[in-house]
């Protein structure tokens, strides 16, 4: 909860569009965001992370959800990146760290990414990050007064060694110029388009 003031300051420039494809938000005040964060933290089985810049200022959040130790599956969801974090090496590194923990530390067999089928930026991100498209569940849920078709993506423990190598290669300091722009794109072998 201590990150709420920083999160609110970071998320305000993104406006309502940050919340379009989420069941939560938009948040128009720090108090509203505090309520959303409290609800996320209190959701059984969810583990919520603040993503911080060097120096500790929070600029986004993401969560593990649908954690099933017996089946060895987990989902990354409720990803909200501020404009300062979106499409940066830090955003990729945050997902790489979350995936690494799932496979390397917990020994899970499957990591999922699900999003509103209309959320093209999230779909592109999932593919770029090494998740494979598995299909669309039509009218999977209802939120904000409309049906949501859900696009499913996943990577498995068999995919992980190649994905991890791609992350490590891409995140190397020498892959970025003095302005922080990538020299080579993240290229995960064997990932198709969805």
Image (cartoon, rainbow, N blue to C red):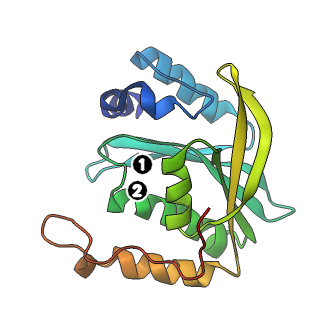
Q: Is residue 21 left or right of residue 42?
A: left
Tag 1 near tag 2, CB within 8 Å: yes
Q: Is residue 176 left or right of residue 102?
A: left
Residue 51's label in the rendered image is 1
Give the labeled residue for mark 2: 91
> Residue 8: image x %, image y %?
37, 27
Mark 1 crowd level (few <14, some 14–19, many ≥20, 10 Å Cα): many
Q: Secondary structure at mark 1?
A: strand
> Residue 83: image x %, image y %?
32, 41
**Of residues 44 and 129, the one drawn nearer to the viewer in this rendering:** 129
Cα–Cα span, label 1 and label 2: 8 Å
Please, is residue 14 above or below residue 71 in the view?
above
Can residue 1 be seen from the camera position used here? no
Q: Which of the 4 quarters of the picture holds residue 93?
A: bottom left
Can residue 128 be seen from the camera position used here? yes
> Residue 6: image x %, image y %?
33, 33
Q: Secondary structure at mark 2?
A: helix
> Residue lying farthest left?
178
Residue at 48% x, 49% y: name it: 121
Q: Tell me the quarter of the image containing the C terminus.
A: bottom right
């Amino acid at each position: 909860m201590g990150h709420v003031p920083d999160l609110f300051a970071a998320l305000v420039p993104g406006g309502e569009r940050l919340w379009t494809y989420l069941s939560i938000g938009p948040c128009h005040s720090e108090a509203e965001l505090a309520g959303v964060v409290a609800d996320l933290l209190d959701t059984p089985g969810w583990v919520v992370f603040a993503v911080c810049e060097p120096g500790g200022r929070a600029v986004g959040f993401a969560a593990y959800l649908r954690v099933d130790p017996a089946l060895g599956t987990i989902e990354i969801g409720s990803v909200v990146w501020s404009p300062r974090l979106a499409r940066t090496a830090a955003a990729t590194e945050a997902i790489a760290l979350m995936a690494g923990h799932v496979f390397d530390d917990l020994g899970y067999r499957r990591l999922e990414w699900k999003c509103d089928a209309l959320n093209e930026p999230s779909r592109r991100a999932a593919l770029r990050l090494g998740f494979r498209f598995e299909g669309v569940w039509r009218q999977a849920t209802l939120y904000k007064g409309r049906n949501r078709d859900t696009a499913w993506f996943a990577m498995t423990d068999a995919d992980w060694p190649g994905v991890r190598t791609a992350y490590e290669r891409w995140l190397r300091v020498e892959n970025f110029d003095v302005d922080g722009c990538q020299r080579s794109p993240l290229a995960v072998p064997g990932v198709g388009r969805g």
